[in-house]
């Protein structure tokens, strides 16, 4: 269960290292508490973080004793909301409530991830995260995921020699394919831990075009996460259409990724608005989840090396969101002289 929760929390920046290492040993919950806890799980799975927080809090109030699982759920929801204070508080409560070393290790690991994934961690927070992962390893023993998480934290502090030791330990413990692949990638290119690399994706657009991020190396990729029911998205269409035509297609690829559930309505809207650039409907929200999208519109600018250079979310009342996107692209040196088809 907690493997799944942590995957939801950390998909933004530590995607493949977000599988937790053990199934917690907890006392079965009272049926009424379990019902609320399950509601929290379902809300978290659906991306409804506020509903998840409310459900986990209700479960905790109903429990005769502090509910470890509920505090972990709260930590997951608060982390995904970017609420560091409450995420850390929930982790500390989970540690205090834990009944064995396995549970304590999990709580410390969550705290380390919160410190790494919320906002822009400074040197102090990197050091705090490192200590949380070291504590988790002391409590849980050798686990490949914990060694990988510690390695990422060390790499972000430019402690590459120490990080290499942890990555080699991770690989030696024969983890699953996803964990092993990331550890090997970091051994080959430590920079991947210091930059936010976009998760790999493949898609086929409404127009039948096939795109694979790995095959777009050398190009700037702009992902437009939107929906027909989003007023700000609709207001931005004119400028987005202009932007899609501004740069040569061998330099910039703009792909609109819709969260619409109704396929017919989505197709009809695209046809009426003459949205001729690549369009894709993210029916299962797989792409949105992999990129940690929680608001519309969100623009993702991925540079020619596959690094996410900027996320632009929502609309600043003082400045149009597409204008901000244009400014970001205009400042990228590799696009100098790239205007025109």
Image (cartoon, grey):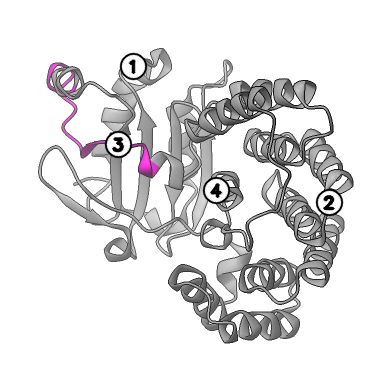
Q: Is residue 116 above or below residue 40?
A: below
Q: Quadrant of residue 268?
A: top left
> In the image, is 10 to the left or to the right of 65?
left
Q: Quadrant of residue 48?
A: top right
The residue wearing badge 1 is: 234
- Counting residues from the N terminus, which is met first, the one under dot 3 or under dot 1? 1
- Counting residues from the N terminus, which is met first, the one under dot 2 or under dot 4? 4
Q: Residue at x 14, y 48 (%)?
A: 209
Q: Is residue 245 above or below residue 274?
A: below
> In the image, is 59 to the left or to the right of 264?
right
- Give the distance between the C-alpha atoms of the residues marked 1 and 2, in whole angstroms: 51 Å
Residue 47, percent from left and from top: 51, 31
- Counting residues from the N terminus, which is met first, the one under dot 1 or under dot 2? 2
Please give the label number shown on residue 153. none
The residue wearing badge 2 is: 99
- Give the distance between the C-alpha atoms of the residues marked 2 and 4, in whole angstroms: 30 Å
Inspect the magenta stretch and tell me whether residue 282 lies in it: yes
Range covered by the magenta-colored residues: 270-287
């Amino acid at each position: 269960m907690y493997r799944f929760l942590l995957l939801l929390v950390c998909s933004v920046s530590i995607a493949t290292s977000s599988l937790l290492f053990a199934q917690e040993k907890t006392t079965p919950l009272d049926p009424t508490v379990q019902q609320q806890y399950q509601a929290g799980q379902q809300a978290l799975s659906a991306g409804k973080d506020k509903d998840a927080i409310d459900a986990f809090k209700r479960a905790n109030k109903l429990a005769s004793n502090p509910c470890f699982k509920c505090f972990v759920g709260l930590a997951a929801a608060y982390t995904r909301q970017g609420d560091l204070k409450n995420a850390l508080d929930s982790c500390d409560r989970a540690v205090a409530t834990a009944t064995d070393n396995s549970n304590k290790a999990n709580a410390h690991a969550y705290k380390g991830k919160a410190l790494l994934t919320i906002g822009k961690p400074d040197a102090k927070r990197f050091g705090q995260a490192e200590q949380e992962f070291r504590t988790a390893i002391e409590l849980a023993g050798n686990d490949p995921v914990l060694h990988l998480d510690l390695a990422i934290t060390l790499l972000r502090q430019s402690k590459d020699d120490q990080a290499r030791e942890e990555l080699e330990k991770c690989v030696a413990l024969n983890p699953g394919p996803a964990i092993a692949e990331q550890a090997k990638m970091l051994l080959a290119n430590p920079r991947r831990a210091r930059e936010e690399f976009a998760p790999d994706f493949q898609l086929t657009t409404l127009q039948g075009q096939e795109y694979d991020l790995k095959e777009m190396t050398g190009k700037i990729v702009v992902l437009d996460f939107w929906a027909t029911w989003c007023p700000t998205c609709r207001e931005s269409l004119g400028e987005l259409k202009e932007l899609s035509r501004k740069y040569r297609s061998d330099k910039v690829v703009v792909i609109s990724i819709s969260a619409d559930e109704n396929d017919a309505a989505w197709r009809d809207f695209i046809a009426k608005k003459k949205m001729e650039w690549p369009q894709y409907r993210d029916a299962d929200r797989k792409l949105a989840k992999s990129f940690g999208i929680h608001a519309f519109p969100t623009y993702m600018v991925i540079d020619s090396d596959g690094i996410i250079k900027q996320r632009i979310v929502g609309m600043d009342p003082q400045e149009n969101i597409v204008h901000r996107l244009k400014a970001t692209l205009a400042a990228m040196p590799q696009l100098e002289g790239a205007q025109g088809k």
